[in-house]
Amino acid sequence: MSKVRVLVGTKKGAFILSADGKREKWEVSGPHFAGWEIYHLKGSPVDPNRIYCSQTSGWFGQIIQRSDDGGKTWFQPGTPPGETKTPDGMPKGESNKFKYDVSKETGAPLTTHQFYDGTQHPWEFKRVWHLEPSHSDPDLVYAGVEDAALFKSTDGGKNWHELSGLRGHGTGPKWQPGAGGMCLHTIILDKKNPNRIYIAISAAGAFRSDDAGKTWKPINKGLVSQYIPDPNAEIGHCVHHVAMHPSKPDTLFMQKHWDVMRSDNAGDRWHEISGNLPTDFGFAIDVHAHEPETIYVAPIKSDGEHFVPEGKLRIYRSKSGGNEWEALTKGLPQSDCYVNILRDAMAVDSLDSCGIYFGTSGGQVYASSNAGDSWAPIVRDLPGVLSVEVQTLS
Amino acid sequence: MIRVVLPAHLRTLAHVSGEVTLELAAPPTLRSVLDELEARYPMLCGTIRDHDSLQRRPFLRFFACAEDLSHESWDTLLPPEVAAGKEPFLIIGAIAGG
């Protein structure tokens, strides 16, 4: 029978939730890396036992952890087990180095971006927001970081180098941080075209590469953000998250800082699909595993009040690719609930009856085994959830 | 022999419990103690000093013999009691945040 493994990053550690295909009885493993912020963990589509994890702390910085056994044991890939490099057998920390490329040879000696006060500010690494393993190679993995940049490892996370064409393509000085920092939070790899990569940055916008990350272009036409003086600005939009179904790689769905958007031409132009949502502010967005026109969002009251509106936890689903939305509430609290759902905290499995999962700032992880028709909590009392990913295991 | 006390999370990362002891040939300075610590425990690189700048991470402080050495020059000699192993060199994380 198939199984699912839910990978949960929280403010105080990582948790792994496992169940068989019925998705009724869950085993909870964790906390792994107790006390650390786990911004994201994600498994390789090629080798589901290979999981990458971003372990971070304002005190101690960034650690990359890797598991090769489905999350049972972890190590810093800078030095795998058995390949220690010190006399005492201590692992190296090379996997934790994210060094911005400032070499003239690559044409990317970019050192400043716009800061909150409009002045230019040097690029400073803070943490890894998102890890995206390749569809074809378990040792190939991308990292989206803060201050926004894209890094790549081809050796299973041991070493990282920047794809500096992104910061260096010309718009970098106009990038500015959102409230949570200037983060590259979304990385989408096109399974059908290994040269195409989409990324999104708060608060710069969305970008696309068609040559495996060497060169990039902004893809923000059609986005409207009232705080940007220039209505035609291509840079400066606070894109919160982007989702894509692998069977339709030219169709993208975006949750922006206000507005839910859609593009059908690989991001060259966007149009709004907020429709009848009670509020179109939010962070998370995802697509049904088998229905490319069925999408899910978690509306949040406003940019000033980051919790669900009216005290009701509601996920909204559109089966028409946007504009017409229905509230999914069965099994979710409908009073006195004031949680948030962050951008990487929603995921889907690929079982026949598509499962949807999301985690909240209140520490709950909810699951639906019927595409959102009904929900039940897997766990209620974790630390605030930062990310949710799901592996479907045969 | 230099005794070093690490914050709890770094002890976990370094797979140690209790104090760490380091052997340094010359009289210890802030720089030489951290160099030796990171050489012995490379997974701590970047967790106490920034990877690139090698500056102290802002939420960490250095103490010895009840004195805050955090803003001293890297070539500051540690107190004789620390050099003799009678007192530890303390790396302390800020009690801040949630």
Image: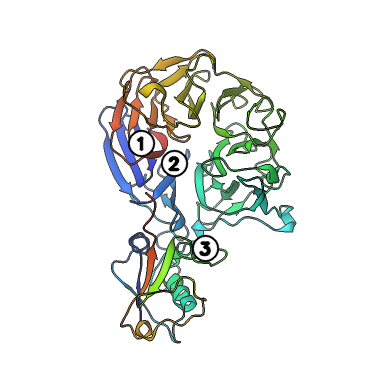
Q: Amino acid at mark 3?
A: Asp
Q: Nearer the viewer, mark 3 or mark 1?
A: 3
Task: Specify whether residue A348 is in view.
Answer: yes
Q: Is disc 1 placed on a helix, strand or loop?
A: strand
Q: Amino acid at mark 2?
A: Gly
Q: Which mark is residue A43?
A: 2
| Chain of the residue under label 1 | A
Q: Is residue B23 left or right of residue A245?
A: left
- Position of B70 relative to B28 (above/below): above
| Alpha carbons under labels 2 and 3: distance apart | 29 Å
Label 1: which residue? A5
Q: Chain of mark 3?
A: B
Question: Residue B8, how many percent across, how many down?
Answer: 33, 61
Q: From the top left corner, tell me how far across and down residue A394 is, in percent.
A: 37, 32
Q: Give the residue number, with chain letter if any, for mark 3.
A: B50
The secondary structure type at the circle numbered 2 is strand
In the rendered image, residues at marks 2 and 1 fall on the same chain: yes
C-alpha span from label 2 to label 1: 10 Å
| Residue type for callout 1 | Arg
Mark 2 vs mark 3: tell me if same chain. no
Tags 2 and 1 touching, CB below 8 Å = yes
Q: Position of residue A212 (x, y in %)?
A: 65, 41
Residue at point 45%, 18% (across, down): A317
Callout 3 secondary element: loop
Q: Is residue A219 above or below residue A40?
A: above
Crowding around mark 1 (Cα neighbors within 10 Å: few <14, some 14 to 19, many 20+) is: many
Earlier residue among tags 2 and 1: 1
Between residues A47 and B51, which one lies in front from this camera angle? B51
Examine the image and state in which quarter residue A17 appears: top left
- How far across and how far down the image is residue A331, in percent? 30, 21
Q: Residue at x 68, y 45 (%)?
A: A172
